[in-house]
Amino acid sequence: MPAPVTIVTQTQVVPGQEATFATWQDGIGKTAGTFPGFLRQTVMPPNPPMQIDWVILQDFDSEKSAVAWLHSHERLDLVRAALPMLAGKDDVHIVRDGGSGVLPAPVSAVIATRIKKGSEISYRAWEQRIAAAQSKAPGFQGYRFEPPLPGVQDDWLAIVRFDSEEHLQNWLNSPDRQKLLAEAVSFTEEFHTRIVRTGFDQWFKSDGSTQGPAAWKQNMVVLLMLYPVVFLFGIFVQTPILMGRLELPFWLALFVGNVVGVILLNWLVPWASRKFNWWLAAPGSALATNVTGAALVAGLYLAALVIFSRLS
């Protein structure tokens, strides 16, 4: 059976064209959806200052289906129409095996390298050395290495995943990596690195072998933790202390509450995600588990509403 693949596209948009590009991207997703083998599309907008690219993931059931879409007249016509909105060169790569390791958790560097002819053996040996070195770096979470695909992509692709932007940058700028890059100059034509960053994924740890929990599950867990934090802080701190004793205006007190809420969620959401891992990790086909988990969270919503209605 053919293995599924993911097309990873990274691109920068001319300032002021973001809304137009988002609309165009919706259109290209709908067009891709009409092609045989298309499974889904995920769009991750820029997250400055770390991630300045738009990142688009398009899943297909096979490499053949993905290549057919990449070379199709429909896609090429749409891409040509979008050129005035784009700044610089797109990176488009195919990652095999259903995209394991593609989705960053929570931050990744996608490194594309083009090597000189006849240097494959030297490059592979060097790649093993840098892979061993980066695996020892603090915060390292995973690594993915993809060779070129004839007629599709000429670059060798490496995806390096870390647990924080700080750890990733420490590795990218480290003396060990710079020394290894200097060793590769003799057989490298060009290479460049682009960063991918996500939002809630930082709170939902993955072992790298599968994609993270479905977005709707993540959102439900975040809301489950967010509502009590906002309510309790508001009734016990924001109203009586910040706005009462300290006489802060509402807009400032609300900002302080949001800061406190975000900080607390960094502990509360990982704790909740561990408790609900049986549900978060369940595949889409596990209907009974998914319904049970969603019903349980909804029940906790209701319980919180009843309890807090008596406190207000």
Image: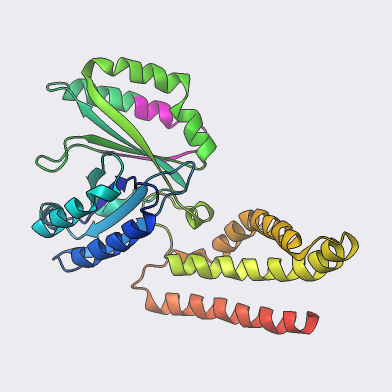
Relative depth, front residue between 271 and 246: 246
Quadrant location, the N terminus: bottom left
| Image vertical order of residue 85 relative to residue 32, above or below | above
Would residue 106 be found to the left or right of residue 307 on screen? Answer: left
Would residue 295 be found to the left or right of residue 60 on screen? Answer: right
Q: Quadrant of residue 213?
A: bottom left
| Image vertical order of residue 48 relative to residue 236, above or below | above
Q: Residue at x 37, y 67 (%)?
A: 283
Range of the magenta residues? 130-145
Q: Residue at x 62, y 78 (%)?
A: 300
Total number of numbered discs in the rendering: 0
Is 185 one of the magenta-colored residues?
Answer: no
Which residue sits furthest right?
245
* Residue 199, position as x, y percentages in the image: 49, 54
Q: Residue at x 23, y 61 (%)?
A: 28
Quadrant location, the C terminus: bottom right
Relative depth, front residue between 107 and 193: 193
Would residue 3 be found to the left or right of residue 253 on screen? Answer: left
* Residue 141, position as x, y percentages in the image: 45, 41
Is 132 one of the magenta-colored residues?
Answer: yes
